[in-house]
Structure formats: C-alpha cells, structure tokens
Amino acid sequence: MTSTLLREAREAMATLAPTSGGGADDVERYARARWSVLTEPGDGVAGHAIARWGAAAALDLALSDTSAPDIPELSERDWRRARARWLPRRDDHAYPLELARRVGARLVVPGDEAWPVRLDDLGVHAPPALWVRGRLDALADPVASVALVGARAATAYGVRVAAELSGDLAAGGATVVSGAAVGIDAAAHRACVAVEGRGIAVLAGGVEKSYPAGHADLLAGLSRRGVVVSEVPCGTAPTKWRFLQRNRLIAALADATVVVEAGWRSGSLNTAGHAAALGRPLGAVPGPVTSAASAGCHRILRDYDGRCITSADDVRELVGWDASAQRQGTSTDRTDDTTRILDALSSRSPRDVDELARRSGVEADRVSSLLGLLALDGRAVSDARGWRQGTP
C-alpha cells in the first residue's frame, strides 16, 4: 500500500466515517466506498473478490492489468466481464464522496457498530457499504424490525391498514422498514413518524436527494429518530434495476416482511421473494376477493406460504414477539398510558398537549406520541384548537 493511497484514503474518509464505533481502517473503508461506485447493487463477482481478499486488495486487483485472481467460485471469463463493467467508473469516485460530505452523509461498513448484521445473510450479494443519513444507531439496533411494503397505487383501505400496522408496531418499539415510495411505503413511514417511532427508509438512489421529491419532509422527519440509507453513492439516480435490488435490502433488514396491498405483478412481490429466499417470515394482508389491488397479497397467501395478517398482533405472532411486551426492555405501559390519555380527552372541548399531560399525569412528549397512534384508529381527532375524543 503506497503512502499516497494511504493519505488519499485518510483524507477521503475524514468526515465520512461514523464519529464513533468505526470498525474498519481508512484504507478498507475507502476501498468499500469505491466499490460502491464501481458496481451495481448485488454484484456477486465483487462480493466474491471482497470476501476472499478484503476490499482494498480486491480493488487493487480489479483496477490492475494482472490476470484473473484465484477465486474458486469464479471463472476467468466471469472476472473479465466484471472488470469490463467496473473500469469505466474507476475515476468516478471523487464527486460522490464530495457530495456525501456536503450533505452530511456517513459511510457505514462491516465491522462498524452501526453495521446491520442482518445484511450479512445476503452473502456475496450484500452491499460493500451503506450511505446513511440520520441516526446510525437505528441501523444496528437489536430491537425487532418489520418491513411493511406494498403498491404505489394504493387504495384508501391499503393506506389505512399500513398506517395502523406501522403506528402500532412503532409505538410498541419495533423498527419499521420500507422503501419511501408513494402509496403503502409512504403510509407506513408517516405513521411511524407520527408516533415518534424508529424507522428505516431504503432508497434506490443517493441519500442526498429525496425520491419522489414530494417526500423530502417525510424523510427529514423520519431521519430525526430513524435513518435513511442506500447502497449506491450520492449522486446516483434511481433506476428500475436499482429499485428491484433495493428490495433485497428491505427484506434483509427486517425480521419479517408484510405486504399490505399489492397487485398481481406488484414489485412488492419481489421483496416477498427475497424474504422467502432468506428464510424470513412472510405475511400479507388480505383484501376483498374482487379487488385487483389485493391480488398480489392473495397470491402470497396461496403460493408463498404467507401468513394472513389482520393486525399488529398478527405480525408479532409471525416472528414470536410477545404481544403484550416488546423485546429488549421496551416499556410495557403503553396500554395504561393510552387509557389515561383517553380519560383526559373531552368529546366536546378541544385540549392541547400540555393540558392533556396535566390531566393524565403522562409526560407531554409521550402524550404527543400516543395521540398520533390514537388518531390512526380514530379514537382521537385534532383541529387548530386541539385534541378531542373521536369515534373509532
């Protein structure tokens, strides 16, 4: 390793590595950053090379003119074709790294405290690195996580069910994973933010830009308690291939995947397929048998051995979580606090959060969180004057 390359790596990684808990040295981290630029998501040839030689040594081999390295799983033809894909991008790393610095993104790699070890189940198809904005601790948090996905062209029924599931699970301490698309994904993310839960949004393009653009505020809100991630570097545009490959990360980051609403050929079935391939529990929400918007869910229930999901408790049962108390020491007083807040609400006179906190004896931050959950099922409603009891 030349002193020039070492200096280049240190300078490049100075502001991109996690501020604490970084497990890789600068050269290895820098090499993984460059691999994320060279490759398209899920490149198994790169994965084999990195697994055998390490990211830095594999990068040297990929960019050199030497013969194919000795990797039993790969033929010389595989390596030649892979290098033909990679070499046109060999000098494309400067701009993505600078853009990441400008937007405050971090680079998380295997060995870091923030690295989500669930991704290791993808084997050689795991990403070499993740580009991250938000709370790094949300990635490797050991609490339960669930992926809620579904169609972009969602119906009112699908949006409501996604919001109810997400709000209940997030308020109970689970991490909600989805893809930040319109429709079901957005409904799941919004409900998670509304109850001040922890979520992970997995993008198909760079984390510096919201896609779609209308979700900028949603992703900003999610990143305050959760995290926005991508395996492609900043400045990368989302494409059909990257959306499909992004789905394997959604499935791998979650303990279970639930498809809330999906047509017969919905891309959500791709996520379901990844979950099934990983051996992760898979569920689907049934819809009317006459609804084309739920045909994909019914297909999962019939052909993918999916479990029927009608409530958040069904999701907890799907992976063996205790319905009355979430794992990892999460508070078990949610039901009692909810009852106290309901008692403090009036059916006629609107009351603000501070007044509800005074009447219920529950701290104001928790009142705000649980009001969001109560609003999802109609037990609380709000207007410019405050909150009132609703009619679920």
Image (cartoon, grey):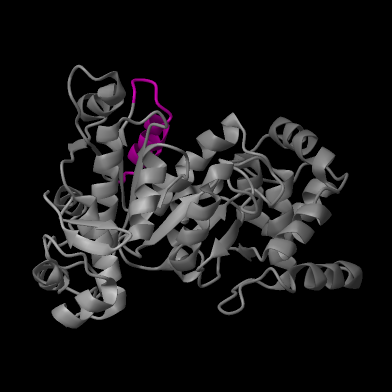
In this orientation, does residue 29 appear? yes
In this orientation, does residue 172 appear? no
- The residue under the point 86% across, 73% down is 7
> Residue 111 placed where, x, y %?
55, 69
Residue 104: image quadrant is bottom right
Residue 332: image quadrant is bottom left
Q: Which residues are magenta?
A: 263-280
Quadrant for the N terminus, please: bottom right
- The residue under the point 45% across, 38% down is 182
The answer to if 346 sits in the magenta stretch is: no
The answer to whether residue 245 is left or right of residue 100 is left
Between residue 202 and residue 34, name the one nearer to us: 202
Residue 18 lies, with reference to residue 48, above or below; the image says below
Q: How many marks?
A: 0
- The residue under the point 65% across, 40% down is 40
- The residue under the point 89% across, 73% down is 3
The answer to whether residue 364 is left or right of residue 268 is left
Between residue 241 and residue 194, name the one nearer to us: 194
Between residue 75 and residue 214, name the one nearer to us: 214
> Residue 357 placed where, x, y %?
22, 78
> Residue 346 placed where, x, y %?
12, 65
The answer to whether residue 139 is left or right of residue 67 is left
Residue 177 lies, with reference to residue 357, above or below; the image says above
> Residue 145 placed where, x, y %?
33, 57
The answer to if 277 sits in the magenta stretch is: yes
Between residue 308 and residue 182, name the one nearer to us: 182
